[in-house]
Each structure stands twice: as C-alpha cells, then as structure tokens.
Image (tube, grey):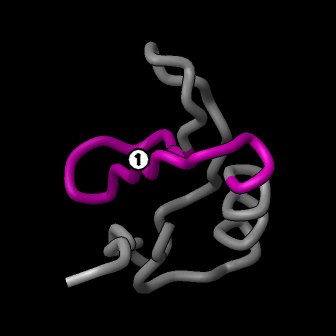
C-alpha cells in the first residue's frame, strides 16, 4: 500500500464560529469555543491551510473535512 491516508474529521452542523490558534507544539489548529460533542479541533500542516479551512468552515461548510 503506497501513498498517504488523509485524516478525516467530522464537523457537526451549527458548531459556531471557528478561529485559528497555535498548539503547544507550534502547529496551527482550527478550533471553536464549544466543549463536549460540538468541540472541533483540526490540526493543520501550515498557517495558510488553517486560514483557508477556517474561512470554509465559517462560511457554513459542515460534514467531513480531509486535511
């Protein structure tokens, strides 16, 4: 089996506004302010990828996200 498998994240509907933060390791994360089942944390490879994903999620995209 060659190639990489892209991680899949499930984004619940109405999860609220998203923002880009920096994790302890220094990598960017896309997150929201909720806790529990509506909490979303999506690690990204670069700041540009995180900004693009954050714009998409704030525009109303929900369902599955592949990073």
- The picture places residue 44, in percent across and down from the top left corner, at 55, 48
- The picture places residue 50, in percent across and down from the top left corner, at 68, 50
- The picture places residue 56, in percent across and down from the top left corner, at 72, 72
- The picture places residue 3, in percent across and down from the top left corner, at 36, 77
Q: Which residue is pictured at 56% across the width and 59% down the height?
A: 16
Q: Residue furthest top?
A: 24
Give the answer, above or below, for where 34 lies relative to 16.
Answer: above
Extent of the magenta region: 30-49
8 horizontally vs 43: left or right: left
Dividing the picture into quadrants, the one containing residue 5 is bottom left
Task: Please tell me whether residue 61 belongs to the stretch shown in magenta.
Answer: no
Q: Which residue is pictured at 51% across the width and 44% down the height?
A: 31
Question: Residue beneath label 1, please?
Answer: 41
Q: Which residue is pictured at 62% across the width and 30% down the height?
A: 21
Dividing the picture into quadrants, the one containing residue 1 is bottom left
Crowding near pointer 1: few (<14 within 10 Å), some, many (20+)?
Answer: some
Give the answer, above or below, for where 49 lies relative to 63.
Answer: above
Q: How many marks?
A: 1
Q: Which residue is pictured at 45% across the width and 52% down the height?
A: 42
SS category of the residue bearing label 1:
strand
58 horizontally vs 28: left or right: right
Q: Looking at the image, which is closer to me, 61 or 26? A: 26
62 horizontally vs 56: left or right: left
Q: Looking at the image, which is closer to me, 13 or 40? A: 40
């Amino acid at each position: 089996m060659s190639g990489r498998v892209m991680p899949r994240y499930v984004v619940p509907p109405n999860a609220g506004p998203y923002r880009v933060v920096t994790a302890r390791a220094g990598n960017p994360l896309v997150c929201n302010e909720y806790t529990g089942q509506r909490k979303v944390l999506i690690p990204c490879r670069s700041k540009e990828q995180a900004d693009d994903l954050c714009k998409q999620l704030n525009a109303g995209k929900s369902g599955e996200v592949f990073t």
